[in-house]
Image: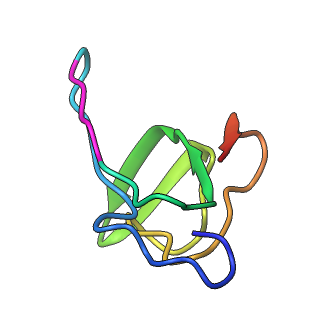
Amino acid sequence: SGPGQPQLSTTGFELARGASRSFTVPAPWTGRVWARTHCSNNGGRFNCLTGDCGRGLSCNGAGGVPPATLAEL
């Protein structure tokens, strides 16, 4: 979420191959959304090859490390 904006109800989730998920954002809202790929959970350490935020499954305000495809709203 952008500065002064409410945190979304979820800030990270896993999708199975071919799955989809919808989420609602309040109006007005600003923030960033990006995908992470090739993720693993190694001994409790969740990390991804692309878009990793270094904070596990929920990024809690941290941005995605390149390479990442980013949507800013």
| Residue at left offset 52%, top offset 41% | 36
Q: Residue furthest front?
A: 27
Q: Locate residue 4 relative to residue 16 in the image: left or right.
A: right
The region drawn magenta spans 19-23
- Would you say residue 21 sits in the magenta stretch? yes
Q: Between residues 49 and 62, which one lies in front from this camera angle?
A: 62
The residue sitting at the bottom extreme is: 4
* Rendered image quadrant of residue 14: top left
Instruction: Answer with left or right where residue 49 lies relative to residue 15.
Output: right
The residue positioned 62% from the left and 60% from the top of the image is 31
As drawn, 24 above or below 26:
above
Question: Which SS does the magenta portion mostly show?
Answer: loop
- Residue 47 relative to residue 22: left or right: right
Q: x%, y% of residue 73? A: 65, 47
Name the outermost residue toward the top.
Answer: 18
Q: Residue furthest right?
A: 66
Which quadrant: the N terminus? bottom right
- Identify the residue at image location x=30%, y=72%: 44
